[in-house]
Image (cartoon, grey):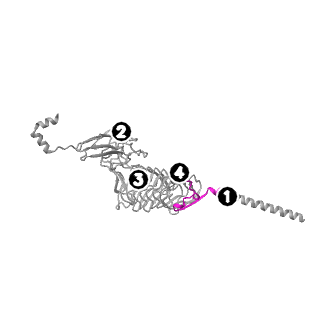
Amino acid sequence: MKNKIVAITILGLFILSSFGNLLVTSQETTNTNNMDVYNIHIYGNDDFTEENGVSSGSGTENDPYIFENLDYIRMMHIKDTTAYFIMRNCIINDHIMDLKNVKNAEFIDCEFETGFFSKDLEDSILKNCVIYGGHDFCYNSLILLGCKNNYFESNEIKTGIYNSHSSDYNIFDSCNIQSPIDSSVYISNSCNNEINNCKIHNSAVGIWFNGLSNYNKIINCDIFDNRLGIDAYNGNQNIIYHNNIYQNEFNVERAHYDTGDFYWNNDECVGNYWDDYLGFDSDNDEIGDTPYDILASYQHQPTDEKDNYPRMYAYDVDSIEPMKPTLLGPSSGKKGVEQSFIVSSFDSDGDDVKFCIDWDGDGEIDEVNSYNESGEMIEIMHTWNKRGNYKVQVYAKDPYGYTSEWSDPLTINIPRARTINILFLKILEKFPILQRLINL
């Protein structure tokens, strides 16, 4: 009996020992698996370290810090940094991306599964990223508060953009933006932002202007499948043109139209396509004969604002800028004598082009000619009344606001005009023989 008890005791100790080993092994495995899980907290430039996921770089513009191929970042907080860094091909999984007072950041080919929150983000880029989720502050995925001079290109925004609190001079280009229960784009108390070439759809409101939101531009976008396409609730000097606005329950509403102006076409006769426009096009120029009325929010009565050049057919929003112009002309001329130059540019869309001309090389536009057919060789003329060397350069512009790069500069020399002493002329008149000798 005693031996049996000893045997059972030994067996029990063996089982406990084995179980303990299993626990240790399990814990080590968990630790090993967690080595690829990052909780990144950077509170100043000194925190860009290998422990925080940095793989290379020194933080300069030419050698930025690199975060790359991190496929499970549980949370990431970055605050008070000016060092240059790039996050590429990374996934932030469980917590929102949180940036505060950050400059010189780039996020490329990343996925943010619970949103992207930024306050005082400046001079940064977000490109080819996918942003899901939202934030406790609001439902939208991409939240910008006091953010300036940032560039957002070719991103998938799943639950909209919240651009507020003086978020100015930001550019959103070629993004796909939706928000099933909120606004796809909300602009509040923010100025001089541009939304270009974007798809804005599947939301309660496509674009909502609120607060003191002034001088913003919406160009070349498709705004569709929203309850309300554009809510121009408040703001001043905002311009909206060359967009397709269609398949919305209501295309546009305007409130507080007595406190500021919205412009629904540019100065070059380019308006928007509205699928509920009921006018005619008697001269077949693809522009409606009568303006499109912008309706008030209350009872949908017409306001004083109109799209004066409503498009009869949808635009091709994938428009391409004109090609770099070719400029030909003399290398020298005479003061006070008009000089002739030849300029041409092709537009891949076949749009007409006009030329913006800098006659003295200072980068400022001195003259703009009228529109001409793409590829046509156009003569431009100019007279210089002072001697000197002048650089002439031009760029092309199509009716939708797309511009080419500058042409190669052409330098023309205007030399000092020859002057003859009046006394010498009188001597020649008195002694004609001197004139004959000079002509020899």
Question: Which residue appears farthest toward the right when viewing the image?
Answer: 1
First-in-chain label (3 vs 4): 4
Q: Is residue 45 magenta?
A: yes
CA distance separating discs 4 and 1: 29 Å
| Circle 3 residues within 10 Å: few <14, some 14–19, many ≥20 | many
What amino acid is found at the position of numbered circle 3 in the picture?
Ile
Q: Is residue 48 left or right of residue 1?
A: left
Q: Is residue 383 left or right of residue 42?
A: left
Q: Is residue 437 left or right of residue 164?
A: left
First-in-chain label (3 vs 1): 1
- According to the picture, the residue beneath numbered tag 3 turns out to be 218
First-in-chain label (2 vs 1): 1
Please state, as top left, top right, bottom left or bottom right, where the N terminus lies in the image: bottom right
Q: Position of residue 201 (x, y in %)?
A: 47, 52
CA distance separating discs 2 and 1: 67 Å
Q: Secondary structure at mark 1?
A: helix
- According to the picture, the residue beneath numbered tag 1 turns out to be 30
Q: Position of residue 78 (x, y in %)?
A: 52, 61
What amino acid is found at the position of numbered circle 4 in the picture?
Asp
Mark 3 and 4 residues: CB-CB less than 8 Å, in contact? no
Which residues make up the magenta segment?
Answer: 27-56
Mark number displayed over residue 109: 4
Q: Is residue 134 left or right of residue 423?
A: right
Residue sitting at 9 percent across and 40 percent down? 430
Of marks 3 and 1, the one in the foreground: 1
What amino acid is found at the position of numbered circle 2 in the picture?
Gly
| Circle 4 residues within 10 Å: few <14, some 14–19, many ≥20 | some
Residue sitting at 14 percent across and 45 percent down? 422
Mark 2 and 4 residues: CB-CB less than 8 Å, in contact? no
CA distance separating discs 3 and 1: 50 Å
Mark number displayed over residue 375: 2
Q: Is residue 268 magenta?
A: no
